[in-house]
């Protein structure tokens, strides 16, 4: 029996969410024995060459690279680029683990926000300690190089701690994340959420990408590795709140008091 490839094309403002992942899961289940491979979603992406409406699906290639820029450089030699075609490149998030954090059984946090400021300005609010605390925390120690320290103290006694793993100026940062100190690691961000094994310092991973978007920036954040649905939902709410504050500050506004003050 022939095998058919199905590709996904999403609108520019599409935001991954638990509800969307549930819809995909339900569809996969409806396919029964016809499903060969669930594939993977792509969050950080770009195109090279002609990918307009006059082109059609021609195939696919999978490769590994340390980041999107490196992947684009590898794809620059694709033969279709000199033959009237184009390629789309996207970083895959493993849907064959259920779009979940590896080993945790918990969907990743995914938040996207438009910021009325250019990527270079937004990048500064993610990497400069003095500007970081304008939208999150009261004290920060940031060393934005691979292997550098990430630590942000909150006014309510929490301190998030980890290590920078990727830094591409004005494009992308990644760092490990968790709560510093044994007591904090066993607590959650929002009252009422059940414990899920805690989130020790450096035990999860956050990836932030910045893309030019309508004269501003489209910031996409993904947080993987949270050990329970309750902790995932708590961090989803927290990141949504704080990235909203970042959008206000980076655009020159006043976000008001920190929700953890």
Image (cartoon, helix red, strand yellow):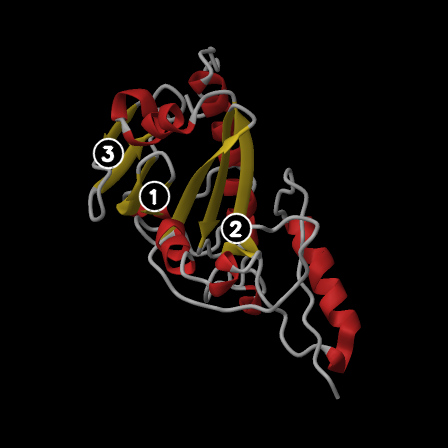
Residue 57, position as x, y percentages in the image = 66, 63
Residue 91, position as x, y percentages in the image = 47, 56
Alpha carbon separation for disc pair 1 and 2? 44 Å
**Residue 154 appears in the picture as rendered:** no
In this rendered view, identify the residue nearer to me: 211 or 261: 211
Alpha carbon separation for disc pair 2 and 3? 38 Å
Give the residue at the far bottom of this rendering: 1
For the point 47% across and 38% down, the residue is 189
Label 3: which residue?
142
Label 1: which residue?
179
Drawn side of residue 117 relative to residue 182, left or right = right
In this rendered view, identify the residue nearer to me: 184 or 178: 178
**Mark 2 vs mark 3: which is more N-terminal?**
2
Q: Secondary structure at mark 3?
A: strand
**Is 158 drawn above or below residue 90 in the view shown?**
above
Mark number displayed over residue 49? 2
**Residue 183 appears in the picture as rendered:** yes
**Is 41 drawn above or below residue 258 in the view shown?**
below
Residue 220, position as x, y percentages in the image = 50, 40
Quadrant occupied by the N terminus:
bottom right
**Mark 3 vs mark 1: which is more N-terminal?**
3
For the point 36% across and 60% down, the residue is 65
Drawn side of residue 167 relative to residue 75, left or right = left
Residue 15, position as x, y percentages in the image = 62, 42
**Mark 1 vs mark 2: which is more N-terminal?**
2
**Is 99 drawn above or below residue 129 in the view shown?**
below
């Amino acid at each position: 029996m022939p095998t058919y490839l199905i590709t996904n094309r999403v609108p520019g403002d599409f935001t991954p969410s638990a509800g969307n992942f549930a819809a995909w899961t339900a569809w996969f289940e409806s396919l029964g024995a016809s499903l060969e491979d669930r594939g993977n979603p792509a969050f950080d992406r770009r195109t090279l060459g002609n990918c307009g409406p006059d082109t059609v699906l021609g195939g696919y290639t999978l490769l590994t690279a340390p980041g999107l820029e490196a992947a684009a450089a590898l794809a620059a030699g694709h033969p279709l680029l000199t033959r009237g075609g184009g390629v789309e490149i996207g970083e895959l998030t493993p849907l064959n683990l259920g779009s979940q954090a590896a080993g945790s059984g918990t969907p990743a946090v995914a938040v996207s926000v438009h910021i009325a400021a250019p990527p270079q300005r937004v990048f500064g609010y993610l990497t400069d300690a003095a500007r970081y605390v304008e939208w999150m925390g009261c004290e920060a120690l940031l060393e934005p190089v691979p292997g550098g320290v990430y630590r942000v103290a909150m006014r309510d006694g929490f301190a998030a701690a980890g290590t920078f793993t990727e830094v591409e100026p004005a494009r992308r940062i990644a760092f490990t994340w968790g709560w510093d100190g044994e007591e904090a690691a066993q607590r959650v961000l929002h009252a009422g959420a059940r414990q899920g094994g805690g989130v020790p310092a450096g035990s999860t991973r956050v990836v932030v990408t910045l893309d030019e978007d309508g004269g501003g920036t489209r910031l996409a954040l993904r947080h993987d590795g949270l050990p329970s649905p309750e902790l995932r939902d708590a961090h989803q709410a927290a990141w949504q709140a704080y990235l909203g504050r970042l959008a206000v500050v980076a655009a020159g506004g006043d976000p008001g008091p920190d929700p953890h003050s």
